[in-house]
Image: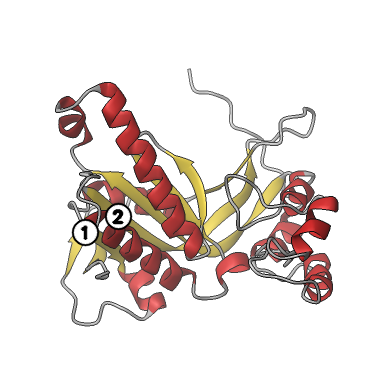
Amino acid sequence: MAAPETPRDDSNEELWRLVLTGQNPALLRARRLWKYVPSDPRCKMCASPFGGVGSILAKLMRHGPMPRNPLLCGFCYRSISKHPGGAEVEMTVLFADVRNSTAVAEGMSASKYTRLLERFYRVASEAVTTHDGIVDKFLGDGVMALFIPALTGEDHAGRAIAAARGLLARLDSMPDLPLPVGIGIHTGLAYAGLIGSHPDSHDEGDFTALGDVVNVAARLGSVAAAHQILASRSAASSARVGDGAPSRTVEIRGRSEPLEVVELAPERL
């Protein structure tokens, strides 16, 4: 029996659209005020300072960085958590998956494989957050990340591709982290927000994204070869990269037409 669908709350859709695109008036006012308080790094939404003497004031006002996603302050996250729902905006989604993870795990103890995955998570998180993305979730042997306009500006595809290249380059420079990773990236409209929240309960839900963009990025991540980045043509075009790079088509379940993808090389450290 299928699980009942979580009700979608559209009452806050315009609020979420403004938040996700960086156009919310309250956030814009906060950014104008916090910019006078030193210093970088800052919350990517309200610009409250995480460094210097300003960080002391920010923490006193409950604007300290979130442990999991240090791009955002706790105040911003708590504020949006009061408004369940989301909105459909253009963004870029990245999936990084360990290739042949069963075979990799078979050659070592469970504890050693777990330690390898934990290091992979840390390296992936650093690559994503360095390029203004948000780690959405860890998926056993993979990572899902979102690059939304509020944090990246209009170049969310470019930031996602830069994160993917940086991640593979970092892994290549770490021979003691022998995990073959493939990455898939896709750009398009997705519904993002607090998914799974219930108005009649205290369940705040999870900040995540749903839709065709997510499904396609996951598919590309699953078929990318080790040390390979597969970016959809829409992502590559948006980032203005991939001219002259190898391309091919990939069959996507549920799509009537195959998807053209570009094979991108990692950067060299």
Q: CA distance from mark 1 to mark 2?
A: 6 Å
Q: Determine whether 96 is above or below 158 in the image.
A: above
Residue 206 or 110: which is nearer the viewer?
110
**Residue 131, label in figure:** none
**Residue 228, label in figure:** 1
Q: Secondary structure at mark 1?
A: strand
Is residue 37 visible from the viewing direction of this image? yes
What colouring does the structure picture have? Answer: secondary structure
Circles 1 and 2 in contact, beta carbons < 8 Å: yes
Residue 240 or 181: which is nearer the viewer?
181
Q: Residue at x 24, y 70 (%)?
A: 268
Type of amino acid under label 2: Ile
Residue 32: percent from left, percent from top: 81, 76
Q: Residue at x 27, y 22 (%)?
A: 110
Type of amino acid under label 1: Gln
Residue 218: percent from left, percent from top: 35, 48
Residue of label 2: 183
Please give left or right for residue 207 compared with residue 216 in the image: right
